[in-house]
Image (tube, rainbow, N blue to C red):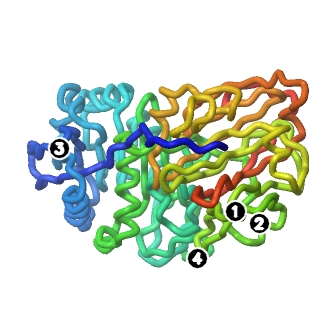
Amino acid sequence: MKRSTGRLATAVTGTALLLGSLSAPASAHPGDDGARILVFSRTAGFRHDSIPEGVEAVRDLAAQRGFAVDATEDAGAFTPADLRRYRAVVFLSTTGDVLDARQQKAFEGYIRQGGGYVGIHAAADTEYDWAFYGGLVGARFRSHPAIQPARVTVEDRAHPATSHLSPVWNRTDEWYDYRTDPREKVHVLASLDESSYTGATMNGDHPIAWCQTYRGGRAFYTGGGHTEESYADPAFRAHLLGGIRYATGDARADCRPENGYRPLFDGTAASLGAWRQAGPGTFALDDDGTLTSAGGMGLLWYAASGFSSYSLKLDWRVAGDDNSGVFVGFPASDDPWSAVDKGYEIQIDATDVPEKTTGSVYGFQSADLARRDRALNPPGEWNTYEIRVEGEHLRVFLNGVEITDFTNTDPARSLTGGHIGIQNHGPDDQVSFRNIRIRELPATHTSRDH
């Protein structure tokens, strides 16, 4: 709602990389802040010709950033003391059994203590008898058809590994089939359209990139990266860098498994047919399926139905010191002030007072600001809200982290049966939204699980 001056206090340091040559043992190249990443490409089975190109791609990304990267094929780097030096470990097309039992134990401890993991392509063809690693990578390689073009459906366009992509990503690679479908355990970022190529065996649901939190650590996997050409492709390089940024903790994302949601706005003009604009403001829909506020105060609200018990998810991005919000629990009305007076707003504006800042129930209750600041991505990057309503109980999750727990006690307002909407606040505010989806919950649902 009301704007205030000031600057966003939260800053997220961009991931930066510097890659040393493949050697044993690894050689360090200090970054500006001392943070390091380990790139590990040992093979005990098939060896990909593209490994040097993968190494070079990370080296190029490093030149733009400034982190230290140690590149090695020496499993001796997997000791508790050595692994503590790294924010993330990248398994670059490793194959077969590459670590002994002692080294595996050290890596498990590293992940349990909050370490990051990135798996690229044949990382899924690694350590079949190590159960912990199987859970970390998410799924194990089974087979692949010939290298060929395919359509990739981008399911999450807020994660830093996929936020730069259009809803459909056309590219050529060696497309892995996996022994199991990981969707129930991981957060799928992108999947293959099996009708777009030949030889697929996963019966229509074919995740190809995903993320998760696992046993205390962060994990990202992409099935791309077989071909040498992949590492010269700007879109794939940005995909890889986004995954590394998530694994290192330099970018936040909601990587909880997400199933059972249906779209309310999917990026198409057709999906806006169930929405209605109240007030003088507008939302502009661009070619990549993003809605951006314009024109002044108003509310774009979902008029087709109200909702009582539900999980609402949406992705949002601010350009700078901008103001908007998500309204819930208000009656149908073409007056945008009806939502203000009779509903609740989950605020987007990180520079206001605590009860009117990002994550707050505007004017009623502040978010946990310390947790909010740790979870928040800065202006220019995407964030994800989950707004979970169960009766008169409302919780807000920012990039998968619970930051607000609120119970309505106002007899003039009710969270059940109301509508939802997104706000345009003023002509100078530029706030964008993507991928608005909902999962309705049983009316008696009281569980805190996800």
Cα separation between marks 3 and 2: 46 Å
Q: Which circle marks residue 84 in the picture?
A: none
**CB atoms of marks 1 and 4 within 8 Å:** no
Q: Which circle marks residue 32 in the picture?
A: 3
Q: Please name which of the two marks, 1 or 3, marks the residue nearer to the observer.
A: 3
Residue type, numbered disc 4:
Ser
Cα separation between marks 4 and 2: 25 Å
Q: Please name which of the two marks, 4 or 3, marks the residue nearer to the observer.
A: 3
How dense is the environment of label 3, judged by Cα within 10 Å: few (below 14), some, or many (20 and up)?
few
How dense is the environment of label 2, judged by Cα within 10 Å: few (below 14), some, or many (20 and up)?
few
Q: Which circle marks residue 266 in the picture?
A: 1
Q: Please name which of the two marks, 1 or 4, marks the residue nearer to the observer.
A: 1
Mark 3 secondary-structure assignment: loop
Question: Looking at the image, is 128 positioned above or below residue 85?
Answer: below
**Residue to which mark 4 is pinned:** 196
Mark 2 secondary-structure assignment: helix
**CB atoms of marks 4 and 3 within 8 Å:** no
Q: Residue at x 25, y 59 (%)?
A: 61
Q: Position of residue 147 (x, y in %)?
A: 42, 75
Which one is earlier in the sequence, the residue at label 1 or at label 4? 4
Q: Position of residue 231 (x, y in %)?
A: 30, 68
Which one is earlier in the sequence, the residue at label 3 or at label 2? 3
Residue type, numbered disc 3:
Asp
> Could one spot residue 155 in this view of the protein?
no
**CB atoms of marks 1 and 3 within 8 Å:** no
Which one is earlier in the sequence, the residue at label 2 or at label 1? 1
Which one is earlier in the sequence, the residue at label 4 or at label 3? 3
> Could one spot residue 300 in this view of the protein?
yes
Task: Count all numbered tags in the image, as a single digit.
Answer: 4
Q: Which circle marks residue 271 in the picture?
A: 2
